[in-house]
Amino acid sequence: MTDQKPENAASNGQPAKSPKKRARKSQSKRGEKANGAAGPAASRFYGTPMPGVTVEELSGSLIVIEGTDGSGRSTQISLLTEWLESEGFAVQTMGLRRSFLVGEDIDALLAENAVTRMTLALMYGTDFFDQLERRILPALRSGLVVLADRYIFTLIARSAVRGIGRDYLHGLYEMALRPDLTFWLDVKPEVAFDREFKKAHSISYWESGRDLSLSNDLFQSFIRYQSMVRKEFEYLSKRHEFLEIDGERSVAEVNGSLRKRIAQHLGIRGTHYRPSNALAHLWR
Amino acid sequence: MGSRGVLSARMATVIQPVIENAPSPEKNARKYPGALVVVEGIDGSGKSTQLYLLKRWLEIHGYRIHFTEWNSSPLVKSATRRGKQRKLLTPTTFSLLHAADFADRCERQILPLLHGGYLVLADRYIYTAFARDAARGCSPHWLRNLYSFAPIPDVTFYFRAPLDVAVNRIVAGRPKLKYYEAGMDLGISLDRAESFRIFQERILNNYDQMIESDKFVLMDGTIPVNRLQKLMRQIVRERVDMAQFAPKKK
């Protein structure tokens, strides 16, 4: 599979982001239109922009945290939210299966294990675009920082390992907004297994890719499936310029790396942060 | 209209000259012994009546057939219903939900039946989405990609009736047009009948543009039902190897 359609590809040579410009803009929205019109519409979308969206009005920032199950995404997002709020930035979050439209329907489909790969891919697509149109775009128009707990990349990777073409998947998400920053918290499948097991005391059907019939041994199945997904991420990382972060380090270290890069993007001077008591248990 | 009424509605719509899409494995190489015959056209064009009669003819003679309708997968129904009732759907999510519904039917019904050697009859197919969703503003290119996993029909009948004829058939028989059916989400007109008419017109134009690119067999929806049916049966016999689906001789 190759990039046949340049309009679908992220790699079509746009100098995609101009972070500093937009960072400033988000702090004083008014009077910077000349400066703020950060480039052609295409640079904020992979392909055709969503109908009815004016790119110039999207003054907020979209920051994506990707990574497989057990990579520590949710922990980091809780901490980043607190840090950003303490710095005076309003935060909106998004994640998989959180749309009002079909979030619960997907839960039900997953519980039944009766769903086929294409249907599931398109239900996730519906879930994604519902959140994009109803939550993300309004938040970005209001100048918020959107923290995405996974994004189209997880959806593409999961479907790709199930044999759906990468070009098809990139085409499906061509109206998605290109993130300002995409972090990939990379952990080895074995480490992810330990963490997931500790959390839930069992390994779920979907996390171990059991629908792919890889192995009857759940541990083997989990490792093989997560390795396949990780491989897709390696490909996506190059194509979409991920910022790779070693997710096996301590929570505090990973958080430090994230803060540093985000601070740079948003124009925050200091990156000092200590979690409040409410979140102190996450800090290990 | 046949006894099934005008079917549920959906409207057709739009589209453009076909963009040949990235090859999709399922679609281009026909690797199955079955055959797929579909009917398309705006509401009130007479397509469902004609497909019903075709189906009866084949059933009565014992052919191996299966009939499938647009928008009928139970798996996705609750989401579609909720979205429509609460008016939550945008052109994009409307389109995606219908695609998910179609994918479910395609993967669990249409493809297995084609591989199992059935003659599959479909009341509306992907061209409905191309015409209708593009009329709502979705990118035709995106739509073509979205449905590129669908097998290409052996015969696509396009039933065409003048807009007034089709619209009057629907409006006369239906006390109240539904919100999305009438294209009210597009904000074309506050009057439902008026909105419906304009929406159908866009859909009709989109269908018309696919006639050549998608090799539609054009059927005049104004000629008498029995004559049209005769023609339809003749075309099916010409285009499909019927012996393959005929009942086994004892």
Image (cartoon, grey):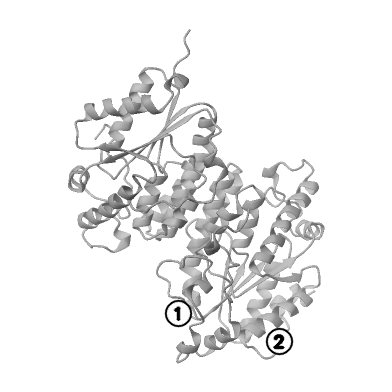
Q: Are marks 1 and 2 on the same chain?
A: yes
Quarter where residue A154 is shown: bottom right
The amino acid beneath tag 2 is Thr
- Secondary-structure class at tag 1: helix
Q: Chain of mark 2?
A: A
Residue for badge 2: A271
Q: Earlier in the sequence, mark 1 or mark 2?
A: 1
Quarter where residue B55 is shown: top left
The amino acid beneath tag 1 is Glu
Q: Residue at x 77, y 63 (%)?
A: A187
Position of residue B249 relative to residue A20, above or below, is above
- Residue A270, image x and y in percent? 70, 90
Residue for badge 1: A57
- Residue B151, image x and y in percent? 49, 39
Q: Residue at x 48, y 83 (%)?
A: A37
- Secondary-structure class at tag 2: loop
Q: How many marks?
A: 2
Bin the neighbour count of mark 2 within 10 Å (Cα to Cα): few under 14, some 14-19, many 20 and up: some
Distance of label 1 from label 2 (alpha carbons)? 28 Å
Residue B46 in the figure: left or right of residue A112:
left
User: What is the quadrant of the C terminus of chain A in the image?
Assistant: bottom right
